[in-house]
Image (cartoon, rainbow, N blue to C red):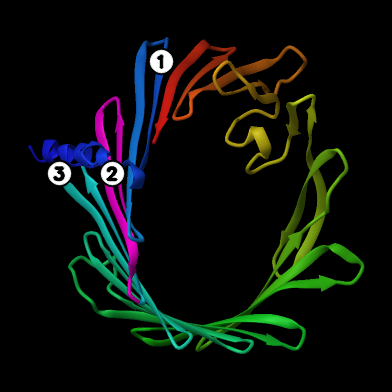
Amino acid sequence: MKRALVLSLAVLFGLGVAAFAQTLSGEWDTTVSIVPTPVSIGLDSTLTVTYALSGWTFTSYSELDETGWQDQTFDVGGALGAFTLGSFLDLDPAGAFDEWEVTAGVSIAGVTFGLDWDLTDDLAVTLSGSGTAGLVTVGADIYFGDPAVDGCDLNWTGIDITVDFPFCCADVAGTISFDCDGFQSACFDVDGIALPNFPWLTLGAELCFELQTKTLVLSPTFDFGDIACFDVYFDVASEGNLIIGDIEITGIGLECTIGGVDFTGVSYWGTGDKPSILYGTDYWEGYQITTTDDGCCGPFSFDISVFFDHAGNLFDIAEFDANMEIQLATQFSFSMGIDITVDTGFTLWSLGFTVTW
């Protein structure tokens, strides 16, 4: 009964104020996925509706899949005199409460004050203040409540004071931290330390003072610059404080546009996150062509991707992926996708549409 009531409120919010279309906007985005073996149908549908009035916005977000209603949130924000206010409410359609967050801010005589209230199973409140005087910027955050402790309390848990200022030839960011036990640390950070004759290498330094210890940590940043035509991926071994080891070329890529068609080719044999079209895949090589052109009724776009397995010769294609989208009207677009893997064959067919107003 509770789920039906909240769903009814969301639908009424999305449809019941249609008469105020000049201040109402939204999007309904739905994709149906069909897996042939074993046969299954998946649904991913979201409805977002935003109502704007006198500088205030009210937004409802509903999410559904093939198992039912998954998420419902309400968001409101605006200004009340000199104050900016915001509130975010997250409800579980199964009948549970997830989160309520309230934010407020005000600027007085060049100093900005903020409040962040976050209620989940526990209550946490953060008070903040910041201001700038010449080249010096000072900020402070005071924390109440501990999400790791059950029960709604406002016990003071800590304060962080930040100060940004120039010193000699560097911009320094300082942070002083206190908690319930007193002073914890004072840390100072500097970025972009240049090394003569090494234009591709800069260092960052963090110096931290604690009650019994002092630490200095250096961190390298590598920028090998733009490489004409091709993208070359590098991996630099570094450890400790600070040893720089071998520079290894881990991949190569090519991106170009030919006659309105974008071509991307990437080969990557390194470790960690893969770049470009290989990101999130298990493949070492991939090629893709994409384009956007005028269709019968509106813009038409498509992309075709081919991925190769690690065994990789010319005929070791591991996966083929193709997607298309066409805008049939100003406020309606249709999309379709297909995915084929060599080991299992036809693995996915998706149909989707997006309605905006």
Q: Which contiguous range is marked in magenta?
A: 57-81
Query: Residue 172 colored magenta?
Result: no
Where is mark 3, residue-wise?
Answer: 95
Residue 163 in the image: above or below residue 301? below
Nearest the eye: 157 or 25: 25
Question: Quarter-wise, where is residue 280 in the image?
Answer: top right
Residue farthest to the left, as pictured: 1
Sequence-earlier tag: 3 or 1: 1
Nearest the eye: 323 or 175: 323
Could you tell me if residue 176 is visible in this image? no
**Residue drawn at 35 percent across, 44 percent down:** 22
Residue 34, disc: 1
Question: Horizontal and vertical percent for residue 113?
Answer: 39, 80
Question: Horizontal and vertical percent for residue 132?
Answer: 55, 85
* Majority secondary structure in the magenta region: strand
Sequence-earlier tag: 2 or 1: 2
Where is mark 2, residue-wise?
Answer: 20
Q: How many marks?
A: 3
